[in-house]
Amino acid sequence: MADGVDSRMYDFGAGKSAIRTVFEQTCELRQQGVHDFWDFSIGNPDVPAPPEVDDAIREVLAELDPIDVHGYPPNNGWLTTRQAVAANLNRRFGARARASEIAMTGGCAGAITATIAAVTSAGEDVIVPVPYFAEYRMYIQAWNCRCVEVPTLPRTFQLDLDAIERAIGPTTRMVIVNTPNNPTGAIYTDESLRELGALLRRKSRELGQTIYLLSDEPYREIVYDGRQSSWVADHYENTIVCYSWSKSLSLAGERVGYVWVPSTVRHARRVYDAILGAQRVVNSICNGLFCRVIERCVDLPAPVAAYERKRDALYAGLTRIGYDVVHPDGAFYLWVRALERDDDAFQERAANEERLFVVGSEDFAARGYFRLSYCVSDDAIEKSLPAFERLFRSYGGYQWQADEPMLPRLRCAS
Ligand code: PLP
């Protein structure tokens, strides 16, 4: 019966994702006063924000006029904040960014949603390599576009350029890449990004339409073993960069990020203004106080050593037990082959038998894997390993072939 409720929005709100299901289970346990469980479900950083952030909050409150802290900021954020961000990008990446090309946003999610809204029209396609951050699906479908899922290469989870080429057609408007990647921890190689740039340039020419590349970079600084993350915008002129300090400075709850539209982007000014329009519609404006704080903290380093220590401990512990784990080069997730092919059943059994809360691969549009978010305490990592070991033994090891490739669910959701 028609009740006036928009069914798409209803599905986004009421739909049970694996992350949401697991999250609700852990909330319920906490409410019951139960604490002997292991929550690897959500990417909410356990490493505290650097003390300089608290100092900056105090400075901002002491030094600025209250209206310049708590009042409405301009829709694209304070000029001085955007200048600080541009200077940071120019110093680190030789980006030639200008403050006028940057818009401050409510986190990376706000930047992505506004960008998709700004450059797509209903019925167009946005291509996403699988596995991917589940929310993309919703950000794309909200604007009546199709989320076109393409596989990545087996085992390495690097970009499969042939698959991307096959997926591009007359209705393609955008490709999203996320490196370092949630959930695999893969860092896309410079070579593959260069090839992707060449492919998108060629296809844009052939089809007579601009294909934008959205580079989603909240884990940009969280890279290990002395590696450098690639600077995606170097490889394709129509790249739009989305970033936040949710992960790099542990400020997930403060909703502070930005979108950068380089001058090389086709119709850059129109794209930028359309992003501001979308910002007004979804009201994903940056938190004013935290714009001021970021101005003072933009050059602080991410706590890479802490995450590298956690990665090493969990990766070593799980592989010693016998789990088949993808070795992550960045971000703070482990992508692990589930002990049975049905990862939903595995997720449930891990929670029921050992109170290990992990996320099956459906949310990431994949199959046969689960994700562990290791932005948790070192103690939780160490103390959970016996539970992982008991679970492995109770299954009797892997119940499906190690050499089966990961099968994307490939729903090509619309
Ligand atoms: N993109 C990816 C790949 C993420 O993993 C997340 C959050 O987990 C986001 C975007 C959203 O980031 P934010 O919290 O800054 O909106």
Image: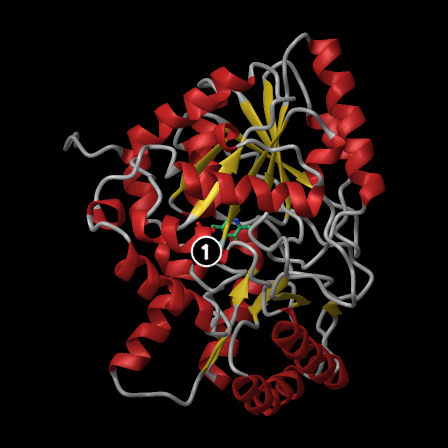
In this rendered view, identify the residue nearer to me: 134 or 204: 204
Disc 1 target residue:
296
Q: Quadrant of residue 393?
A: bottom right
Per the image, label 1 sits on a secondary structure element best described as: helix
Who's the residue at 78% across and 25% down the image?
199
Q: Residue at x 20, y 45 (%)?
A: 67
Looking at the rendered image, the quarter that the N terminus falls into is top left
x and y percent of residue 210 in the render? Answer: 63, 16
Amino acid beneath label 1:
Arg
> Whole-percent x and y of residue 83?
50, 39
Q: Position of residue 153 (x, y in %)?
A: 79, 47
Seen as rendered, the residue at the extreme left is: 3
Q: How many marks?
A: 1
Looking at the image, can residue 138 be seen? no
Query: Is residue 22 something that shows in the picture?
Result: yes
Say few, some or many: other residues with alpha carbon within 10 Å of mark 1 (under 14 / 14 to 19 / 20 or more).
Answer: some
Q: In this rendering, is residue 154 above or below 200?
A: below
Q: In this rendered view, identify the residue nearer to me: 398 or 228.
A: 228
Tell me where residue 352 appears, x and y as whole percent. Answer: 45, 80
